[in-house]
Image: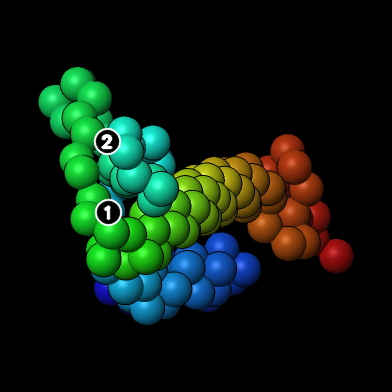
Amino acid sequence: MKSTSTPPNRHTKARDAALRQIAQLGPFIEGSLSSFKRAGCAKPGWHLTFKQQGRTRTLYVPMDLVTQVKAWTLNYRSLKKLIRQVTRHSRALIHSHLANQQAASRAKALTRLSPPKGRSARCEPPSPT
């Protein structure tokens, strides 16, 4: 996924670091884990709440899976944070690329407008000596 067309700078390095962190993440799941009081039980029950097709859904999580699902939801939050970092650095790369292109075109336009060395701006032939 490495791009060879952009020279390495702080944005490419930071983006690559975030991509490496994404690759190291374990399983993830979107949603929030919340406990609820069960009637007649001392221990709480657990639900995973998430959005699906614009509607809020709730899924019962068995007690023996609660620690795993909690880790998965934390991984998902980390994933979202890393995705935002990658996006921010990718946008910065686009912005700097555009700025470099504009600067290059301005420099090219200036070199076309400036007279050659040894000649004046009015383009008069050199006087014989």
Q: Which amino acid does label 2 sit on?
A: Phe
Left or right relative to 122: residue 78: left
Q: What residue type is labelled 1?
A: Ile
What quarter of the picture does the C terminus occupy? bottom right
Left or right relative to 7: residue 126: right
Quarter holding residue 106? top right
Left or right relative to 73: residue 127: right
Q: Decide: is 38 above or below 76.
A: above
- Which residue is tagged 1? 29
Tell me where residue 41 appears, x and y as whole percent.
34, 44
Tell me where residue 21 appears, x and y as whole percent.
44, 73
Left or right relative to 54: residue 28: right
What quarter of the picture does the N terminus occupy? bottom left
Q: Residue at x 50, y 74 (%)?
A: 17
Looking at the image, tell me whether mark 2 or mark 1 is earlier in sequence order.
1
Secondary structure at badge 1 equals: loop
Q: Is residue 33 visible?
A: no
The type of colouring in the image is rainbow
Q: Decide: is 41 above or below 53.
A: below
- Which of these two is toward me, 19 or 126? 19
Q: Which residue is drawn at 26% across and 63% down?
A: 65
Label pair 2/1, CB-CB below 8 angstroms: yes
- Which of these two is toward me, 5 or 57? 57
Q: Decide: is 107 above or below 12.
A: above
Return the residue found at the far front: 40
- Which residue is tagged 2? 50
